[in-house]
């Protein structure tokens, strides 16, 4: 009857954990692993209960039991690698992948071999004992080893967790490790005596029920969603391995001791009591309050200094260096302070703009309710001027105009200024001490200030990096705007020439036709420019096509205006270019030539093919001064009174994007010749 109650409780609690987990977290890999592990454990309970109730069909039911037991290594190993971890599948170490692949051997053995190959039982109905064969011995040895590996993985997860993360997953961790430790105990007994004592089944059921209850409590009371980053090179030295070794020694000693107590000693009850006391001991030892008290006591009575400063400095440096974003850096600062000084919560306030207010940026387990600190608050002024750390057990919360209620409600103990050479960067508020009675003195304050300098430096670097990125974005936008203005200037110049010529030739039918063509081309180019502005990409890609350069030059000359002053000649040459971009180059060179001759010309455009296809623009203008030749293609450098200094820079970038170059020949007072090689 007791076994039925224990098994039912274990199964129902396991199902409750499965249901709550799926409802709160959805179907992720971690959730699926949890479901698989608890389902296998529950199914094992039900099937072993059936074996106890129907011993006459022992081997028929044991085939199913073996099938479920063969799934335990894969299920619990996957659980240990994914539960509460922030780990991608690709980041699983090779050794763990090998272990996962090796778990496939267990289902194959259970599927291909009959139960009689694993164990035998002359009188199971009376003795409740299964004697292991050689195959059975190695099968259960494998189950024990994989339970130990899973324990090591769970220990790695817990050891990499922060103070707050440990608080959240503590009962999850204790529940899972308790059940795995029970499997180690259960199967080690079988290996010690070469038999499986089904009389220990109540112990296993009790521990599974306790484990599921703790996991359920952790989900309901402390939440989920913790994701811990575990190093790929996790240390091979493990407390679990040491504990398992000591346990196996203890099992051997207990085996010898039982000879003196006799067979009538209630072995199952003793093991259950010892195991429950072990779980209680683990719960106590994992208490952060107790750990903090012990640490303070040891440092106070056995060491000169309260902290190992080198270790704390390296740990805090590693935390800051591991941050990959601004939020990650701020969370690392809070995690570092909370862990070192034993605080359950904290908030980082950063200066916002020029209003003199410090508003929250990142919070850990604290209610904010719009809290802020003002530069005019007396304690804040003292923090900024003297680097003073505010101990709120000694200060008056009412001195803070916007954070008095926040300080009282969240039991804030310390306000730590983060100062750089440019002033106060932020304020760290720490509250809810793990050990309420801990006394903080000058060593704590000195370490707080040291960490504050490093944190402030990291925050200042972050702020400067963001300002630099913003400046670069503005620079890019300015450059794009300059290019656009330059294109518009060329279009306006074309329209201006058309208007000037219209005053003298508006009655000429041929001129009217040319004017309509020029206006139509200008409108089309403006529409194209507007379309590009609407969907401006980060980097303009070229659209190559076969283009007749002579025809392109004639069209460009028409777009530039200057009726009668531009001549286009040469041979028809085909090249693979971006028509629109190369047309911009030719129009820009022709417009420059017209401006150099004050619109009178002559300007000659020649197309040909030497070592490569080329377009050459020649004018008889004023030429280029020798002093300016070195800066001819530099942005924002020009000799024109109303020029932007961007045209030739844009031309060179376009031509170089085509794999070409621009050559210049000029004699002051005699004109210039630009050759575009494509």
Image (tube, rainbow, N blue to C red):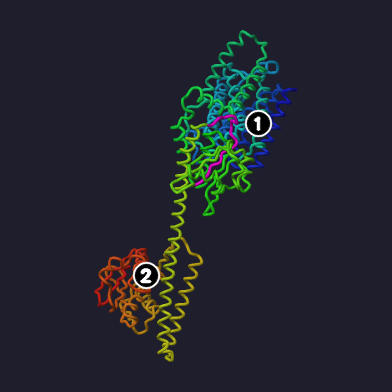
Contact between marks 2 and 1 (CB within 8 A): the answer is no
Give the labeled residue for mark 1. Answer: 214
On the rendered structure, is 676 left or right of 483?
left
Disc marking residue 647: 2
Percent position of residue 503, x then y: 42, 88
The boundaries of the magenta stretch are 425-440
Spatial CA distance of label 2 from label 1 is 73 Å
On the rendered structure, is 51 left or right of 506?
right
Q: Quadrant of residue 479?
A: bottom left
Percent position of residue 95, x then y: 48, 33
The single residue placed furthest to the front in the displayed view is 378
Of tags 2 and 1, which is closer to the observer? 2
Compare residues 412 and 80 and report the one nearer the observer.
Answer: 412
Provide the secondary structure element on which disc 1 rests.
helix
Percent position of residue 599, x then y: 35, 81
- Magenta segment: does it hold 42? no
Percent position of residue 388, x then y: 50, 40
The single residue placed furthest to the top in the displayed view is 260
Q: How crowded is mark 1: few (under 14 residues within 10 Å), some or many (20 or more)?
A: many
């Amino acid at each position: 009857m007791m076994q039925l109650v224990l098994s039912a409780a274990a199964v129902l609690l396991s199902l409750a954990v499965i249901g709550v987990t799926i409802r709160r977290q959805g179907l992720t890999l971690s959730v699926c692993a949890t479901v698989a592990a608890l389902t296998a454990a529950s199914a094992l309970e039900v099937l072993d209960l059936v074996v106890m109730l129907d011993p006459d069909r022992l081997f028929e039911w044991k085939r199913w039991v073996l099938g479920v037991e063969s799934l335990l290594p894969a299920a619990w190993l996957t659980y240990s690698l994914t539960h509460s971890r922030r780990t991608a599948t690709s980041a699983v170490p090779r050794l763990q992948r090998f272990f996962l692949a090796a778990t496939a051997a267990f289902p194959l053995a259970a599927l291909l071999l009959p139960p009689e190959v694993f164990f035998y039982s002359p009188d199971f109905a009376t003795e409740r004992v299964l004697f292991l064969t050689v195959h059975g011995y190695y099968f259960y040895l494998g189950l024990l080893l994989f339970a130990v590996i899973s324990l090591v993985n769970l220990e790695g997860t817990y050891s990499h967790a922060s103070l707050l993360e440990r608080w959240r997953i503590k009962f999850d961790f204790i529940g899972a490790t308790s059940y795995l430790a029970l499997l180690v105990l259960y199967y080690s007994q079988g290996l010690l005596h070469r038999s499986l004592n089904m009389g220990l089944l109540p112990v296993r059921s009790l521990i599974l029920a306790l484990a599921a209850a703790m996991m359920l409590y952790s989900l309901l009371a402390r939440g989920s969603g913790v994701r811990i980053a575990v190093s790929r090179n996790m240390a091979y030295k493990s407390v679990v391995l040491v504990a398992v070794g000591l346990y196996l020694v203890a099992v051997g000693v207990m085996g010898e001791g039982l000879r003196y107590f006799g067979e009538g000693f209630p072995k199952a009850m003793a093991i259950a009591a010892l195991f429950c006391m072990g779980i209680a001991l683990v719960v106590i030892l994992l208490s952060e309050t107790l750990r903090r008290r012990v640490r303070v006591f040891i440092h106070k009575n056995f060491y000169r200094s309260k902290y190992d400063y080198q270790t704390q400095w390296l740990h805090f440096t590693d935390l800051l260096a591991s941050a990959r974003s601004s939020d990650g850096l701020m969370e690392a600062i809070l995690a570092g302070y909370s862990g070192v000084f034993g605080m359950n919560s904290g908030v980082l306030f950063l200066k916002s703009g020029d209003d003199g207010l410090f508003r929250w940026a990142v919070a850990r387990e604290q209610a904010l309710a719009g809290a802020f600190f003002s530069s005019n608050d007396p304690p804040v002024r003292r923090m900024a001027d003297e680097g003073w750390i505010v101990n709120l057990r000694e200060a008056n919360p009412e001195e803070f105009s916007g954070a008095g209620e926040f300080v009282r409600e969240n039991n804030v103990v310390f306000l730590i200024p983060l100062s750089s050479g440019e002033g106060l960067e932020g304020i760290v508020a720490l509250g809810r001490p793990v050990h309420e009675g801990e006394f903080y003195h000058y060593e704590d304050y000195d370490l707080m200030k040291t960490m504050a300098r490093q944190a402030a430096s990291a925050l200042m670097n972050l702020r400067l990096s963001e300002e630099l990125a913003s400046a670069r974005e503005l620079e890019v936008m300015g450059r794009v705007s300059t290019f656009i203005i330059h294109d518009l200037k060329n279009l306006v110049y074309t329209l201006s020439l058309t208007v000037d010529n219209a005053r003298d030739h508006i009655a000429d039918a041929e001129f009217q036709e040319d004017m309509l063509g020029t206006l139509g081309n200008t409108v089309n180019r403006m529409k194209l420019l507007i379309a590009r502005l609407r969907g401006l990409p980060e980097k303009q890609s070229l659209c190559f096509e076969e283009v007749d350069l002579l025809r392109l030059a004639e069209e460009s000359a028409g777009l530039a205006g200057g009726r009668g002053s531009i001549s286009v000649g040469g041979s028809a040459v085909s090249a693979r270019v971006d028509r629109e971009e190369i047309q911009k180059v030719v129009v820009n060179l022709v417009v420059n030539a017209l401006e150099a001759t004050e619109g009178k010309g002559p300007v000659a455009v020649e197309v040909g093919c030497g070592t490569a296809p080329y377009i050459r623009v020649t004018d008889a203008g004023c030429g280029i001064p020798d002093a300016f030749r070195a800066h001819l293609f530099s942005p924002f450098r020009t000799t024109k009174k109303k020029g932007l200094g961007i045209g030739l820079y844009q031309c060179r970038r376009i031509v170089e994007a085509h794999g070409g170059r621009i050559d210049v020949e000029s004699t002051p007072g005699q004109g210039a010749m630009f050759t575009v090689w494509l």
